[in-house]
Image (tube, rainbow, N blue to C red):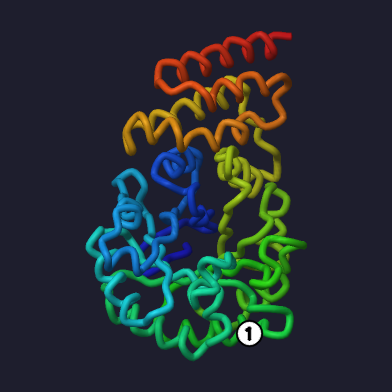
Amino acid sequence: MIKIGDIELGEFPLLLAPMEDVSDPPFRAVCKRNGVDLMYTEFISSEGLIRDASKSMQKLDIFEFERPIGIQIFGSDIEVMKEATEIATAAKPDLIDINYGCPVKAVACRGAGAALLQDIPKMVKMTAEIVKSTHLPVTVKTRLGWDESTKYIKRVAQELQDVGIQALSIHGRTRVQMYKGEADWTMIGEIANDPSIHIPIFGNGDVDSPEKAALMRDQYGVQGIMIGRASIGNPWIFREIKHFLNTGMHLAPPTLSERVETCKYHFMEGIKWKGERQGIFEMRRHYSNYFKGIPNFKPYRMRFVTVDSVEEIIGILDELSFAFEELETF
């Protein structure tokens, strides 16, 4: 049984990675329905939290059905991160996660996210102070290093464990790589199998199929897997991986009708959470992902991004459902 503090996650947990503008409560709802074991909020600016910025504060929204769930924060100032930890703790998540992996310029060039991989002493000090600032378990998500010459992840894992983190998620790329090339799981495996490391090590990067998940588990020995981009428009990946790991067989993919039903559920959860106007607008980024590879979808997509009422969106989805039923009949 893999545990983070007192949180039991099963024998080989699947985690939903925190993704900006993606892993909000509506998206988390569809992933939860499909078997994810632990989820995180979108990453939240510590500066935004202490300034009570509305966008940052809204990201603290969590719901009982989502548990266990972690709130992820990022920042470059230790005192600000401590205060943000206290604010996040008050929102009553199950754990606090620190982002030391975000590679985008807007974050890293301000000394936050993956930038801390260039200053490990500061990373360790910041982590120690955050651990002291909350009664909740603290976890970390990071990368192998800043670049090929600074892959210090083994040192990072040991020193962060020593100051009290209770799990570590490692993306198998450096910051310089961004999301290019292939993720290197070798170093992740070395840490997962290091007898001096006694916290769970979760592998992240390029896991987009049940076969890759099995490879992560069986060849590299990680204690669980974090999945990000592969879940966008494909929340079924969690149940498909679990089925494959348990049986060695592939689960049937979702039917076209199920795609429609899941998209509709996602949409309505967004309306409930953010209201009609914002819910309609933010859902527009998801339609093409849900129906990727479906023939003759372009006219529907054009309609999805131009209509502005709940009734019209539901009507288009119902049309799709009817059209898909005909496709599945033949």
Crowd band around label 1 with a 10 angstrom C-alpha radius: few (<14), some (14–19), many (20+): some
* Relative side of 23 to 226, left or right: left
Front residue of 325 and 115:
115
- Across and down, in percent, residue 40 comes to 43, 56
Residue 199 visible at all = no
Q: Quadrant of the C terminus?
A: top right
Q: Secondary structure at mark 1?
A: loop
Report the label total.
1
Residue 206 visible at all = yes
Note whether 210 is above or below 146 in the view shown: above
Q: Residue at x 53, y 86 (%)?
A: 158
- Across and down, in percent, residue 171 comes to 62, 66
- Across and down, in percent, residue 282 comes to 46, 38
Residue 155: quadrant of the picture: bottom right
Q: Which residue is mark 1?
A: 152
- Across and down, in percent, residue 306 comes to 52, 24
Q: Residue at x 30, y 64 (%)?
A: 49
Note whether 20 is above or below 202 in the view shown: above
For badge 1, the amino acid type reads Tyr
Front residue of 187 and 294:
294
Q: Residue at x 39, y 61 (%)?
A: 44
Q: Residue at x 44, y 53 (%)?
A: 39
Front residue of 266 and 209:
266
Among all residues in the image, which is located at the extreme left?
Answer: 90
Note whether 49 is above or below 287 in the view shown: below
* Relative side of 307 to 205, left or right: left
Among all residues in the image, which is located at the extreme bottom?
Answer: 121
